[in-house]
Image (cartoon, rainbow, N blue to C red):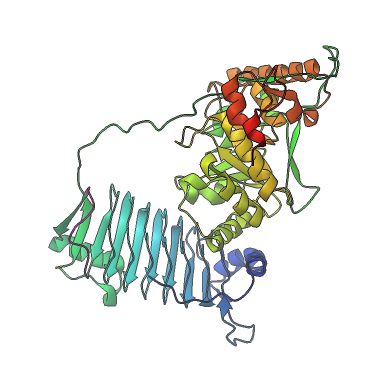
Amino acid sequence: MEQQQTIMAEPREVVERSFKINHKLGPRLIQAAEQDAILRIGWTSAGDPVPKNGELGLCPNLPKGSKMRALGVLGSWIAAYGSGGNFTIQGDAGSFLGAANRGNTINCEKIAGNFVGYAMRSGKISVMDGVGDDAGAFMEGGILLIRGPAGERIGGGMKDGLIVVHGDVGKSPGSGMTGGKIIINGRYPSRLPSGVTQRLLTAAEVKSINAELDNEGMEIPKDAACLVPTEVLQTENLEPPVSTSDLTSIGLVAGDLHHTANYQTCDTAVLIADGKSENLTVALPLPMLPILSDGKMLESAEIEPLAMDVLAKQPFILRENPRPLDFVMLDHKNLADAPELLSNCSGVVVDLDELPAMTSEEIDGFIVTIRTLLGIEKPVSFVNAISRVESLHVRSSYHDIDLAISRIEDGSGIAEAAALPMIGRSTKSHLSQGSTQTGMLLGLSASGQDLAILRASGIDVICCEVPMQDPQDLAHWLVSVANELTGILRRLGLESIELLERQHLRALDYETAAISGLRLVGYERPLPHWFAR
């Protein structure tokens, strides 16, 4: 459904304006909730209307009892991650209205865009003049009430909750749903997606749902359609293709430098810099961010002191319970936990492969929300498939993202050696004029040799899985990787990892030279086809 809104201001101006509104509202929200007062956006202090035009990412994580009222045409990601506040929009809203809702009551008096109530867990969202596509996608609870038409795939992937539509819906309603109900008081496609069935409501259900809606003008009739999931034949999913090779066919050569003494220290630290301030950086003892699911294990009382000292200095990428030095990986599964996760971490890694495809305006709205929760000075990273590396770099540069990470295991089967020139060319074309750093996400754990090769290839930070889950063993693995990396630097005669360059790399076989553009060992230059135009 086409949304009736026009955003005239420049995107950067809108983003800055939105940040300022969130910054001003922050301290006042709790105070207003305690006083049962309503805060207003879109009116002067004298009460004269000054409708908003495109502001986005407003009021994330509204606290319980807070009341907000906005006037005008708002952009995407309004009132996301709410914890129990009340938000009313006298006008239109963009995409992702009330995303990851956890208790807010949201009322939009006109049109809302795509992905209304995306990944919401609880609360109630009402839209009075229709919504776009994918409303209620990945819902886990709560109520989504829509008057007017709804677009395609309403309730897609929903696990629980209630969607009520007083109007017509588009194609594929409930596609991929595993729980919850979609009530449609209007027309819907006669051909439903696999795994979705239509049934009649019982009298008890009609009474219960209308009591839950608590809105006399929006009650459902007894002949409304009810879409629910049904069992389908389950088959094993085929594993996607994996990278066709690793980095073992790439070697590191010393050149003319002599090796250094085996007691000489080498600098292996790397900084992730926030592009908006030269003084705000995150220091990594190794150019590596290992990935774990839960950070609780890193602070166990049973860890030996020496191992604890190692773990206490190494940031990880975590999905749950981050420490202050760690990064949080955000996707649709833990999006609703963003307020707690981002309040206690060093930065965020956004998995674009596990979130809906977003327009530039929607990305801006999303960034406003997470930077409001995280702190505007902390680094934000994007992860995307290696086959989309140019798109990742273009978007990261445009949206001032601090670290752009390419995922090798994206199902394409692209070899790690072939990924190096892909990232290198894209970096030169799209990131050379900005402050965005480059990263690579490996499918397995990294060795010191891997870190050295990737750093020499121009990759700033390497993300990888860990080889074991035991914290004691993790500490030993980190020390062994550091020792291996230091040994390589000493052999090459380098005092710092920053001195590693592409000239130190050699392809050890013809195939690797052919796909990577590296100098073939013995031949000592790239293969001829790399010079062809």
Rendered residue at 46%/55% (across/down): 100
Q: Quadrant of residue 107?
A: bottom left
Query: Which SS type dominates the magenta stretch?
Result: loop
Left or right of 14 on screen, residue 244 = left
Quick check: is 194 in the magenta stretch?
yes
Is residue 468 visible in the rendered image? The answer is yes
In what quadrant of the picture does the C terminus appear?
top right
Q: Answer with the quarter of the image where residue 22 lies.
A: bottom right
Q: How many labels, in total?
A: 0
Residue at (20%, 60%) from the top-left corner?
226
Residue 232 part of the magenta-drawn span: no
Give the residue at the far top of this rendering: 262
**482 with respect to 474 (left or right):** right
- The residue sitting at 24% across, 72% down in the picture is 219
348 or 424, which is in the foreground?
424
Vertically, is 462 above or below 470? Answer: below
Query: Residue 68: image x %, image y %?
Result: 53, 71
**Rendered location of residue 245, percent (x, y):** 52, 24
Front residue of 337/368: it is 368
Please identify the quarter of the rendering in which residue 103 is found: bottom left
Stretch in magenta: 186-195
Q: Nearer the viewer, residue 284 or 516?
A: 516
Give the residue drawn at x 65%, y 51%.
401
The image quadrant where one finds the N terminus is bottom left
